[in-house]
Image (cartoon, helix red, strand yellow):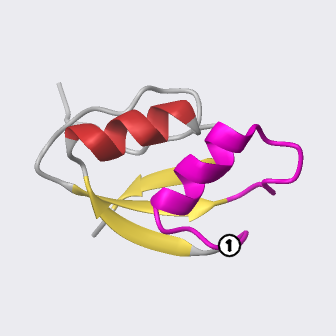
Amino acid sequence: MMAKAVQYNTAVNFKVGDSKLEVTQTKSLIGATPKHRETVRSLGLKRIGHTVVRDADAVTVGMLNSVKHLVKVEEAK
């Protein structure tokens, strides 16, 4: 079997690992619950289209799983 490139989208739960993740805010926080707004803010995202690079540790993965409908996640190169 060939190894597939790992690409995350909003439909999958993210896994803890040694890799780095590029997180981009794709949707507005208007209408989002206050808990989701705080989570996106604590990830370091400030506006739609803003991208940050985070480690794939347990805390970050937990935050991403709770706001996966607001962000796009890719493995950093």
> For the magenta stretch, what is the residue range?
26-49
Say if residue 42 shows up in the picture. Answer: yes
Left or right for 6, reference 3: right
Residue located at (28% from left, 41% from top): 59
Q: Is residue 29 above or below residue 48?
A: above
**How far across and how far down the image is residue 36, in percent?**
64, 41
| Camera-nearest residue between 63 and 2 | 63
Name the amino acid type tagged 1: Gly
Residue located at (58% from left, 38% from top): 68
Residue 8, by quadrant, is top left
| Camera-nearest residue between 37 and 13 | 37
Residue located at (41% from left, 45% from top): 7
Look at mark 1 in the image and give the residue it sits on.
Answer: 49
Q: Is residue 69 above or below residue 45?
A: above
Left or right for 46, reference 22: right
**How far across and how far down the image is residue 52, in percent?**
44, 71
| Camera-nearest residue between 57 and 31 | 31
Residue 17, by quadrant, is top left
SS label for mark 1: loop
